[in-house]
């Protein structure tokens, strides 16, 4: 007897192949495909006489089915592999208490069965033991300084093994964390010895199961690392067959130059290249996706293994401190706060934003403080949702005072992109889907709860930008292939039984900037390791997820 059976649905198997009918079962966490049996007499729920999982109730008139303990009626539905979110910042969301439960649940409610964290150069490991405390205080992922930084991948995995998860988690190694964990937060080149140590720690993490190397070359201390340093590290990733994943050094006026740097790193290191949340943001870069996508296609045609991901929104989200020039963050968060207390240093920041700094992606200079709103400021919840320009007085002073009051931990949303650029990237054949979700309290970007249903509902069904099968492939098989997640991202006999069941006529995002955690419509069920974690759009309370590795 199967543990689970989904009957009467059409199957989008994750390969991009046309929809076809099949019954999909699960046994011991693995997929069992069966011939279609026709519309099922069952409602959502367990077959009568079998144990009732939390959150389930047998439908009226349900009839027993000898093939499975739990039967889900998929009539009118599509069953697909569980979605793989290739770009998240959920490294620590499940390590906290009840106040983070809704945030941690948002991805799985929209069908994400595997999240890849450690992006943008920021992971929770590795570091030399003597620098662990410093990193915990200064890390961008620190949720107000409460997240530990682990010495190695084993410590990271052990912590998550003790924290129940509804879905799976894989992690990249963040270059910024690695650099801070060896060099510190100073604006200087790594010494040859320090670079050797960084390469050694990276190799150990990859050997233990990390999924690749990431950089965030607009963020300190990653921005202090030059091209040669990243080439050396990406060469280690290449030896382990893992990708180099990059938040480019500039996604605005110098985006094409930044893309060429990424291509150089891939060429010299031999690593596969993956460009994170590809965009051309700010008024000086609007429309340039025509050229960047053509360049990516040219690189692919020339033999380079290069892909990218995208989220389906015209606003991004990051830390407020990233709106300041790189030198403001030299030395980490404590040094930043000292500078913010100094009126002369604030004047320097004001001038840098107005005039620009060579080599710096100047978000405010490319848009304005009126396009930047507060997403998370845990001590000033009344300001969440308001723009920096609306806080009163000089906006640099307003930003400085808020950062000081919040210990440097403020997340913002920046409305900086154009819809035609988003559509162009989304439609590219080498693009997969990543939410870039930042699970912090307050008003996080709605992409944390809406990304995948938005692609399926708005862009595939309503706009016809891509087919449902192509959209599912971008979310599943393509993502699993890029990150080496064998047996995931496809529905076939023996694959991992991570599945989603959704109504193709109703699937849609509901999350908004004002109410960012609203669950999607049309998501009938989510199955992780053969166990339902969402039923009828609601979490079941099951926690079968864990750390997964290439």
Image (cartoon, rainbow, N blue to C red):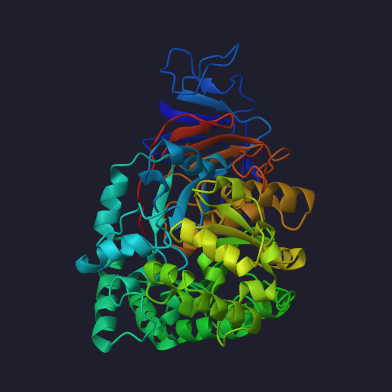
Residue at (49% x, 48% y) in the render: 379
Q: Which residue is drawn at 32% across and 60% down?
A: 136
Please identify the residue farthest to the right as the structure is shown. 463
Position of the C terminus by quadrant:
bottom left
Please determine whether, in this image, residue 46 is positioned above or below residue 498. above
Examine the image and state in which quarter residue 296 appears.
bottom right
The answer to which of 83 and 48 lies nearer the viewer is 83
239 left or right, relative to 461 = left
List x then y, in percent, for residue 451.
62, 51
Residue 328 visible in the picture: yes
Quadrant of the rendering where the N terminus is positioned: top left
Q: Residue at x 39, y 78 (%)?
A: 234
Task: List the single residue furthest toward the left.
Answer: 129
Residue 340, horizontal then vertical, whole percent: 48, 70
Taking 387 as reference, is 162 above or below it? above
Task: Say left or right for 82 vs 368.
Answer: left
Compare residues 520 and 16 and report the one nearer the observer. 520
Residue 437 image-quadrant placement: bottom right
Residue 199 appears in which quarter of the rendering? bottom left
Point out residue 278 in the picture as x, y percentages from the top left corner.
Answer: 61, 69
Residue 309 in view in this figure = no
The one of 431 and 204 positioned closer to us in this rendering? 204
Eyeballing the image, is 14 above or below 69? below
Nearer to the camera, 460 or 477: 460
Q: What is the x, y in percent for residue 421?
A: 72, 68
Number of numbered discs on residues: 0
């Amino acid at each position: 007897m199967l543990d689970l059976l989904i009957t009467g649905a059409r199957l989008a198997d994750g390969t991009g192949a046309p929809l076809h009918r099949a019954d999909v079962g699960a046994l011991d966490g693995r997929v069992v495909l069966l011939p279609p049996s026709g519309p099922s007499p069952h409602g959502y729920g367990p077959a009568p006489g079998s144990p009732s999982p939390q959150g389930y109730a047998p439908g009226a008139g349900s009839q027993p089915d000898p093939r499975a303990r739990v039967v889900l009626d998929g009539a009118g539905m599509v069953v697909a592999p569980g979605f793989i979110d290739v770009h998240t910042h959920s490294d620590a969301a499940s390590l906290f208490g009840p106040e983070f439960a809704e945030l941690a649940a948002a991805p799985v409610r929209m069908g994400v069965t595997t999240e890849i964290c450690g992006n943008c150069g920021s992971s929770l490991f590795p570091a030399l033991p003597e620098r662990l405390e410093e990193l915990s205080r200064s890390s961008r992922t620190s949720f107000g300084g409460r997240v530990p930084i682990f010495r190695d991948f084993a410590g990271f995995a052990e912590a998550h093994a003790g924290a129940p998860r509804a879905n799976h988690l894989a992690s990249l190694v963040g270059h910024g964390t690695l650099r801070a964990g060896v060099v510190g937060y100073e604006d200087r080149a790594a010494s040859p010895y320090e670079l050797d140590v960084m390469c050694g720690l990276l190799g150990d993490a990859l050997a233990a199961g990390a999924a690749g190397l990431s950089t965030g070359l607009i963020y300190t201390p990653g921005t202090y690392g030059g091209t040669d340093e990243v080439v050396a590290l990406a060469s280690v990733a290449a030896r382990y067959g893992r990708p180099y994943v990059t938040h480019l050094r500039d996604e605005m006026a110098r985006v094409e130059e930044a893309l060429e740097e990424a291509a150089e790193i891939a060429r010299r290191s031999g690593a596969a290249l993956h460009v994170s949340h590809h965009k051309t943001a700010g008024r000086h870069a609007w429309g340039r996706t025509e050229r960047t996508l053509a360049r990516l296609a040219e690189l692919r045609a020339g033999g380079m293994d290069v892909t990218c991901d995208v989220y389906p929104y015209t606003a991004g989200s990051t830390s407020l401190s990233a709106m300041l020039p790189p030198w403001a963050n030299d030395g980490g968060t404590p040094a930043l706060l000292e500078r913010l207390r100094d009126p002369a240093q604030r004047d320097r920041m004001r001038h840098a934003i107005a005039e620009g700094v060579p080599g710096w992606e100047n978000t405010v200079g490319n848009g304005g403080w009126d396009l930047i709103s507060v997403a998370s400021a845990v001590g000033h919840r009344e300001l969440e949702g308001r723009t920096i320009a609306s806080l009163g007085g000089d906006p640099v002073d307003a930003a400085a005072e808020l950062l000081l009051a919040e210990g440097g931990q403020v997340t913002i949303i920046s409305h900086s992109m154009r819809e035609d650029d988003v559509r162009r990237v989304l439609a590219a054949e080498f693009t997969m889907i990543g939410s870039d979700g930042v699970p912090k309290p307050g008003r996080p970007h709605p992409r944390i709860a809406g990304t995948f249903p938005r692609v399926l509902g708005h862009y595939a069904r309503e706009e016809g930008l891509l087919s449902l099968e192509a959209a599912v492939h971008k979310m599943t098989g393509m993502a699993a292939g890029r990150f080496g997640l064998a047996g995931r991202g496809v529905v076939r006999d023996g694959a991992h039984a991570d599945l989603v069941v959704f109504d193709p006529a109703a699937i849609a995002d509901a999350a908004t900037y004002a109410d960012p955690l609203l669950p999607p419509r049309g998501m009938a069920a989510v199955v992780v390791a053969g166990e339902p974690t969402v039923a009828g759009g609601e979490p079941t309370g099951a926690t079968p997820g864990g750390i997964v590795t290439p």
